[in-house]
Image (cartoon, grey):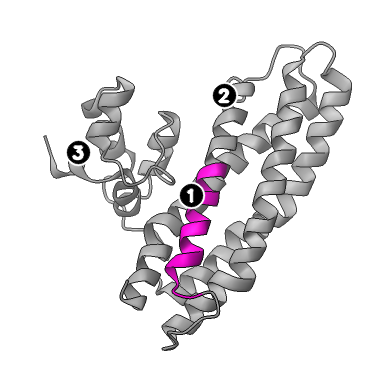
Amino acid sequence: MTALHHLSLGELAIRRPSATRVLERYALDYCCGGNRSLLDTCRERGLDAEQVLAEVESAAPEETPADWVELPPAQLARHLVDTHHRYLHGELPAVDQLAEQVRQVHGGRHPELHAVRHLVALLRADLEPHLRKEELILFPAIEALAAGHRQFAFGPIDNPIRMMLIEHDHAGELLEELRAATVAYRTPEDACASYGALYRRLEALEADTHLHVHKENNALFPAALRLAGA
């Protein structure tokens, strides 16, 4: 057994960025559940930790940490806005509209699409205000914290961070429900091009959101709390 077994899933994803592809394949939560160890999580899920770790180690044995890992908190916050926030601002309304179109055409033969449509709407309603709160309140406060400020109208920095963590958990639950409703984004034989496109885009949105939340939960927020001396 190696030391990697005892790393948390979040730490593993930071040290081995390619591990996220393996963790996604096994549906191991490295973002909201990133504080759990690989070994404990595999035991609970009935998975072979040795097999999972072997796939992690073979994914990119010579890789270096992703560029964002080395960013200081203020720059990491800007990176999140420029990449994941920008992506979601464009993708959420587009996928919401596509889910409604597919439901209208195929909902009679595939009643699960009504649940998919509802969950996509809930996810959009959940994430869009969340992004605005980060962009208008938390991330500017993290930049001010990095510049030496310690007093905020909302109190200590851990107040909004705690709220963002709760909202991350809720978004993660909605993504789990979407994966279940779509049977892991498996399209039926009679699926048209739009139906297939919807499921592919939802799966990509899930993967991007997992990485997005991982960067915040396991890198940005701990760094901000260290800056604040919390």
Question: In this picture, which residue range is highlighted in magenta?
Answer: 155-170
**Numbered circle sitting on residue 211:** 1
Q: Main structural element of the magenta stretch: helix, strand or loop?
A: helix
The residue that mark 3 highlights is 5
Q: Residue furthest bottom?
A: 148
Q: Residue 131 appears at what percent x and percent y?
A: 63, 60
Mark 1 crowd level (few <14, some 14–19, many ≥20, 10 Å Cα): some
Q: Is residue 51 above or below residue 174?
A: above
84 is higher (above) or lower (below) than 113: below
* Disc 1 from disc 2: Cα separation: 18 Å
Give the CA separation, mark 2 to mark 3. 27 Å
Kind of element beneath mark 2: loop
- Measuring 41% from the left and 64% from the top, which residue is drawn there? 221
Q: Give the residue type that dot 1 points to.
A: Leu
Q: Is residue 97 left or right of residue 213?
A: right
In this rendering, is residue 229 above or below 210?
below
* Amino acid found under the numbered disc labelled 2: Ala
Residue kind at label 3, given as amino acid type: His
